[in-house]
Amino acid sequence: MFANSLRYVSRILIPAMTKKILGISAYYHDSAAALVVDGRIVAASMEDRFTRLKHDPSFPVNAIAFCLEAGGIDALQLDAVVFYEQPELKFLRVLRQLISAYPNGARKFAAAMKSWIGEKLWVRAKIVDTLGIDPSIIMMVPHHQSHAAYAFYASPFQSAAILTSDGVGESVSAVMGRGSRDGGLKISSIGEFPNSIGLSYGAITGYLGFRPNDAECSTMALAAFGVPTKLEFFRNLLTVSPQGTLSLAPGYFDFAEDRKSAFLPSLIDTLGPPLDGNPKCFSAFDAAHVASDASWQRGADVAASLQLRTEEILLEQARLLRESSSESCLCLGGGVAMNAVAVGRLVRDVGFDSLFVPPDPGDAGGAVGAAFLGSLRMGVIPPPHSPEQVFIGAPATTVYKLEDFISRVDASLWKRYRSSDATRRVKLRVRNFEDPSAASIHVAAALARGMIAGWISGRAEFGPRALGARSILCDPGRLDVAERMSTLVKNRASFRPYALSVTEEDAGKLFRNDWHQPPFDWMQATIDVRPESRRDVCAALHVDGTTRPHVCRALTQPKFHALLKNFGMHKGVAALLNTSLNEPGQPLINTPEDALIMFARSEMDLLVIENTVIEWCDE
């Protein structure tokens, strides 16, 4: 049923005598599918890349189709299909939670029962109906085992300590333990619902007026503008036992309610009235900011207090792990591991020799972890994985596949897509470069002149970070260009900073020794920028003098590495401001067609699709 789901897929020929495992995550947020063959990741994608519904929780029919097509197999050739959690156990926890709030939550109870009884509880039947497979090959594995398996088996380590933390799975919100390629996973719970960093962070995100399960990054960004005046409150709210177990003080949250309003009046009495999610008084481009809105300074102080307490908890738990496990390496998983500021703090302060965060430690990555667990149950131990594992999404696109589409692009077509507030440029110049190096030199020169470029190259990234496969790029030393991108391309709140891509050869110019750590390969952690280099990357600098880097290696990404080097010939540092190629409220671009539509709607100056460069011209 999936044979024609994608028009262009680079197939990977898989020998017949292999173990082919499909992992699936679904029904909460960020549904995804992953294909693992003999312990190696062949393909993985979030469902929202196809449906264009950000954080799409629906059963990932399109992502499954992509993975099977990329592997060159059909569903009947699968040895196992593994779901990333155990729905029956999760349903029992939800049922207990809702009954305890009854009758106050009667409407919520009815809605939840309709959702669960309608589809969520019958995952096995859904898989059978969708794939047409024998139900005996379907496995259900615990949620946090999926997180832990991805965190460890995607790493380059032979053995490591493991720490995962998120909102909640079946009933567990955090685990710690150890992974060994010889001895498997040994983990134990250190957080049970409702004792959860993820749920608490999400509830405060809602209190600040941001969208939980989506805009926790906004809470983290806002924290940079605050002073932790409420730290003692959060230390009393979230405590950690000598064994690392997390406890949440009762009376401040009700997680049976909508996550946007999960905070109770007692929290408002302590922290003040909720906010509206629009802190216009702060700018990431102004390190000498002065808040002009007292209520939002209060909000920033709340965010700073929560952020600091989150870092303290993770440090406490990780230090306990270091002492108890005798391991020199640490792997992090779960949605809390997406907190780049906290990960940066762990890299600096926790004392492990090396720290690893997989490309997507959240629920989407759970699909990969589930597939790893399926491999283990079939006797296949996943080998250590390499940095290029992140580029396992949508396939590369070559120029000939775009020729028909581009030939139909004329001024009248572009006018249909231009936004009402866009400039009047509607004339296009399309150049196909036969020599990739010539295209790279041309684009680097345009970026050095202050242009903004959309960039599609090779297979798409798996996970939330744009890493030079589906990116928007500009000069990191030009604040005016970055502000234009925020206003006219990304429609991005001014307090949210940008990230940075830099070649491994020039990383030492910007950072000290920590940049060799794996989290800096994929923008998973913040790092201090050398004071003498901050001017060169001021547009990608956070107000505290840090940035979130992607250290690009020539062996992993030769084409993007060449672009960075060519840009460095103009500016002295081979680094570019790098943000995700997507419109506001939408997931990362998946296809060239999606990118062309975004290009028409935005104020990007050029769009690069492999060796084809599309530029706006003056009329």
Image (spheres, rainbow, N blue to C red):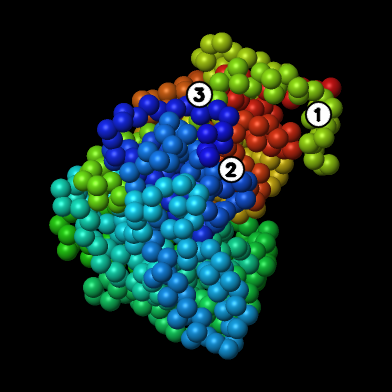
Residue at (47%, 34%) from the top-left corner?
69
Residue on which disc 2 sits: 50
Rendered residue at 51%/14% (across/down): 437
Q: Determine contact: label 2, label 1, CB under 8 Å.
A: no
**What secondary structure is marked by label 2?**
helix
> Mark 3 highlights which residue?
563
Of 320 and 484, the residue lying toward us: 320
Q: Hey, what amino acid is under mark 1?
A: Leu
Query: How many badges with numbers are in the image?
Result: 3
- Which numbered disc, 1 or 3, marks the residue that appears first in the sequence? 1
Q: Secondary structure at mark 3?
A: helix
Q: Return the mark for residue 218.
A: none
Question: Looking at the picture, how far across and down is residue 573, in whole percent?
Answer: 47, 28
Residue hosting label 1: 413
Relative height, residue 181 to residue 315 (above, below): above
- Within the image, what quadrant is residue 495 found in? bottom right
Q: Is residue 183 visible to us here?
A: yes
Q: Is residue 247 left or right of residue 97?
A: left
Q: Nearer the viewer, mark 1 or mark 3?
A: 1
* Mark 3 → mark 2, Cα distance in angstroms: 28 Å
Q: Amino acid at mark 2?
A: Phe
